[in-house]
Image: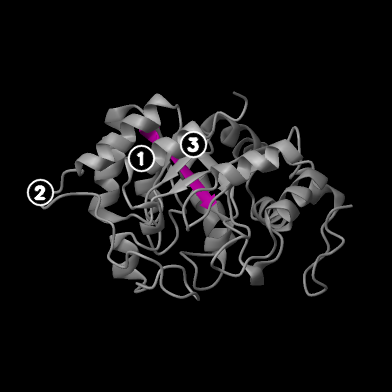
Amino acid sequence: MVGEEASPSLPTLSDRDWERVRGALDGHVHAAPSLAPRWGDDRELAQAARAAGMAGFVLKAHEGDSAARADLLRREFPGLGVLGGVVLNPPAGGLNPAAVETTLRLGGRVVWLPTMFARAHVEHVGDTSGIPGTGRVPGRDPVALVDETGRPVPALREILDLIRQYDAVLATGHVAGAELEAAVRAGREAGVRIVVTHPEYHVPNLSAAAQRELAQAGVWLEKCYLTTFPGQGAGDLADMAARIAHIGPERLVLVTDFGQAPRGSPVEGLARFLKGLAEAGVPEAWIARMARDNPRELFAADR
């Protein structure tokens, strides 16, 4: 059974815990190759996901494009829904419509706004070196989404048009504050599907009330396991469960954001996340919806 390799310091996962993972789609995971230390590579992640009976996962790379990597995994693991996209950090040219169109034409499904190079990330987290724990990468300055008047820059609007044309998803990355509001507003005006990346993380650090308002407006939001760890966000699993209860399950997707070497397997992390939410009182039907049904709708996984 998947999970036999669990660390002896962690409680054993039961068959019921693994049953929650079957059919799930984790919309936010990382793997090697990467500038940051990773738990495993693309193939190891796909092997673990298939063994657990997952529907698939969305592969994210702060270094740029992951669509080509996802395509290779889909060929090697038929039936496993591996999706990719592009993160608009400086290695991809920042807000680069050419990079976005290339990724989408190659089958990419998600366009992430800047992460470590978002203005809010630099201001709130203080890291201007790129990927934490690594050397500098090209383009140290933050990537600006709005002009001096607070309006989206033309490149962002062009990117949103491309996302709409290719029926892809806009993910907000590490954008926060006024830039997040402007990006979400422009995305809604462009008619694209939007998912707010780890809203409990330091950036954007959204309140439950703000998240509920976004969900009621049709915006999707991640509920991210990583943000329940000390120093990674706002609150623990009990706090996460309370926020889910306040917002409701309709526009929420459960993700791990795992792949960091110290965290262990993203697939096992998902099993522990779903187990923890169940133990914190989140109804099983809600967990199934947020881990299985909602991600498939958000990412149009069946197309």
Residue type pointed to by label 1 = Ala
Residue 291 visible, this orientation: no
Q: Is mark 1 on a helix, strand or loop?
A: helix
* Residue 293 location (% of width, % of height): 62, 32
- Percent x, y for residue 60? 54, 51
Q: Mark 3 points at which residue?
A: 251
Q: Where is residue 79 in the image (x, y as percent from the top left)?
A: 74, 32
Residue 69 vs 158, above or below: the answer is below
Q: Position of residue 241 (x, y in %)?
A: 56, 52
**Residue 300 visible at all:** yes
Seen as rendered, the residue at the extreme right is 1
Front-most of 158 and 2? 158
Quadrant of res 123: bottom left
**Mark 1 and mark 3: Cα distance apart in space:** 30 Å
Question: As rendered, which of 128 and 255 lies closer to the eye?
Answer: 128
User: In whole angstroms, how far apart are the C-alphas of marks 3 and 2?
Assistant: 31 Å
Q: What stretch is highlighted in magenta?
A: 216-223
Horizontal placement of 74 versus 212: left or right?
Answer: right
Is residue 76 located in the magenta-colored stretch of the structure?
Answer: no
Residue 149 image label: 2
Q: Is mark 2 on a helix, strand or loop?
A: loop
* Residues marked 2 and 1 touching at CB (< 8 Å): no
Residue highlighted by disc 1: 98
- Looking at the image, is mark 1 or mark 3 nearer the viewer? 1
Please tell me whether mark 2 or mark 1 is closer to you in this view.
Answer: 1
